[in-house]
Image (cartoon, rainbow, N blue to C red):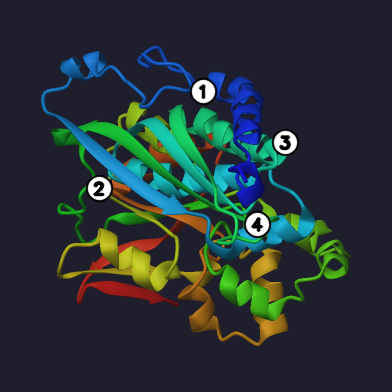
Amino acid sequence: MDYKHSGVDIEAGYKSVELMKKHVQQTMRPEVLTGLGGFSGAFSIEKCKDMEKPTLVSGTDGVGTKLKLAFLLDKHDTIGIDCVAMCVNDIACAGGEPLFFLDYIACGKNYPEKIASIVSGVSEGCIQAGAALIGGETAEMPGFYPEDEYDLAGFAVGVVDEKDIISGKDVAAGDILVGMASSGVHSNGFSLVRKVFPMEKEALNTYHEALGMTLGEALLAPTKIYVKALRSIKEAGVRIKACSHITGGGFYENVPRMLPEGKHAVIKKGSYEVPAIFTMLAEEGQVEEKVMYNTYNMGIGMVLAVDGADVERAMEAIRAAGETPYILGQVEDGEKGVTIC
């Protein structure tokens, strides 16, 4: 008896590392001091000396049950983008610049090509965010996960000068709420998605005119990474007073998180077009509108509060970064919360 016969293939682990190296290398930043395969990743903070009070910000998350669709469709090259996005978008919400990322993949059986495909997506997400992929772990856990399944999680660290932290404390009545379009469902609410739509290959591979693609393609569309857009706004000289990443809990949970006490957000439903995937999800599942806004991003992945005088510059900066902005509504005095009308 040996380790391989117990279900853990060390040689497959070595092969996975070799196959992923080319993807990881594309994410490197000058501050990275170690190569792939060490016991830890080293990252120089020399550049942070230019900041008055450099402050580390961090985020960790996974992809959730969206992974089930990747298993069904045997498509694993974009799910890593979702993992990175869920972490770095939270860092960017605080005004931070993502510096580096680490991933954790736990699987029932190590198929090196599949692991490398997952990591290719992680690397692409890191490239989009400007973060270095400086380490990770692939854990083969036979008997714990089915052979063809895996879990994926990540951890990111960023930096921001303390004076530039986006806290929401200065949000005032009259501030304008600007939204950035999402790419679809992103990485939240998939437990409900899987109850509404048949989780079968035939259904997922069916083309829908309203979507302009198959159902599976629409649902697996990777989460938008907003790091460059938020940086573009800052470089345009616009101060973001508050920022909310619209993830699990949709508008009703996430928008109030960026507001101070005594301030209320009012968002106009007609201020942007809700993507067809959400209309389809609501109709097929007979999901009430409030539940949709309390579960999904409904087409807006990030909400910002800016001074009214800065709106046009903010919108231009978002467009320059390749994202689509909308004026969603405004901040009013009142009980902390959000009204969607």
Tell me, for residue 149, which label it has, or none: 4
How packed mark 3 is, by other alpha carbons closer than 10 Å (few <14, some 14-19, many 20 or more), is some
Looking at the image, is mark 4 or mark 3 earlier in the sequence?
A: 3
Q: Residue at x 59, y 68 (%)?
A: 190
Find the distance from the CA under tag 4 to the CA under tag 3: 14 Å
Tell me, for residue 236, which label it has, or none: none
Give the residue number, with chain letter if any, for mark 1.
Answer: 27
From the image, state whether disc 4 or disc 2 is nearer to you.
4
Looking at the image, is mark 2 or mark 1 earlier in the sequence?
A: 1
From the image, state whether disc 2 or disc 1 is nearer to you.
1
Q: Amino acid at mark 3?
A: Glu
Asked whether the viewer can see residue 126, the reply is yes
Relative side of 112 to 42, left or right? right
Find the distance from the CA under tag 1 to the CA under tag 4: 26 Å
Find the distance from the CA under tag 2 to the CA under tag 3: 44 Å
Find the distance from the CA under tag 4 to the CA under tag 2: 42 Å
- Secondary structure, mark 1, is loop
- Secondary structure, mark 2, is loop
Q: Residue furthest front?
A: 1
Q: Residue at x 43, y 36 (%)?
A: 102
Tell me, for residue 241, which label it has, or none: 2
Q: Quadrant of the C terminus?
A: bottom left
Looking at the image, is mark 2 or mark 3 earlier in the sequence?
A: 3
| Quadrant of residue 265 within the rendered picture | bottom left
From the image, state whether disc 2 or disc 3 is nearer to you.
3
Q: Amino acid at mark 1?
A: Thr
From the image, state whether disc 1 or disc 4 is nearer to you.
4
